Amino acid sequence: MKTARRMAIAACVAAGIMGTMGAMAEAPAKKMNILAVAAHPDDVDLNVGGTLLKYMKAGHNIFIAYTTSGNTGSNVMTDTKLIGETREKEALEAAKFYGAKVRFLRNDDERLLDTNETRTQVLDALRWAEPDIVFTHSDTDESPDHKMTSHLVRSMIISMPGINQQSNEKPCKKRPSVFMWETGRSIGFVPEVAVDITDEFETKVRALGCHKSQFPWMAEFGNDRFAESMRIRAAFHGLQYDCKYAEVFRGWRTSSYMPNFKLLP
């Protein structure tokens, strides 16, 4: 928490919003709902797994929603239905590390679009989790599914309480803090806050190890060190923010929705 607070204060000073930071209350003692909305099974473990582990250890409720099942994410398997089923099973195994409830929206991989259907799906996922905090992809991430997932989350979050919105879930009056994670290909991403995941890192590696179907697939792109590349990125951010391993985030802001950095672990 010291690392997260130090980085958040620095960001507020740089942005000239120290008044907002100073007005924040201490993190509540009550149990919170934490939701991660990701495009593909493995995105959570790669980018926010350590932070979710910290929340889990503190007794908070973890929820995960995947907008696609990554059903084209293989050149080894050719049956897209089987790929999607395999990756969902892997995601469920990884979710056990966080004690997370998981929801699959099952849109086609690399075909995620902004439609009435996908907006309803994402709104349903947000209401399902009733989150105090939402983590998702960065708006600067150049992966099409990543960027669209971020867009859908940010588009629908203010509709959580709307009684006239198309939804299969009851309205939720919470105004969650939204944090966007860095993936290594988020062009122009400038971190605002870092969470020290040193104690959680090896468990994060084990969670990522559940996604065995992706190892040969990633090797085709020159990433035959799936876990090692994650370690390098976490160590780089740790070096930046005075710890061994870190995950970094940016807060998302819009009218009446401001990120409360004090809620980070």
Image: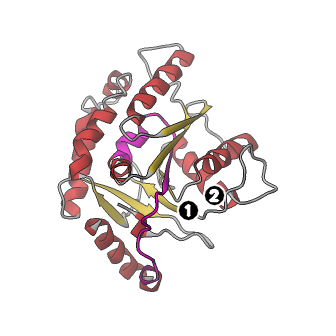
Q: Quadrant of the N terminus?
A: bottom left
**What is the CA distance from the residue labelled 2 to the residue labelled 1?**
8 Å
**Horizontal side of residue 215 vs 252, given as left or right:** left
Disc marking residue 24:
none
Residue segment shown in magenta: 21-49
Q: Residue at x 26, y 35 (%)?
A: 227
Circles 2 and 1, Cβ within 8 Å, touching? The answer is yes
SS for dot 2: helix
Disc marking residue 157:
2
**Horizontal side of residue 20 vs 215, given as left or right:** right
**Horizontal side of residue 106 vs 30, given as left or right:** right
* Residue 158 percent coordinates (x, y): 66, 62
Q: Earlier in the sequence, mark 2 or mark 1?
A: 2
Among the 4 quarters of the image, the one containing residue 28: bottom left
Task: Give the residue type that dot 2 points to.
Answer: Ile
Could one spot residue 73 in this view of the protein?
Answer: no
SS for dot 1: loop
Look at mark 1 in the image and give the residue it sits on: 176
Task: Give the residue type that dot 1 points to.
Answer: Pro
Among the 4 quarters of the image, the one containing residue 243: bottom left
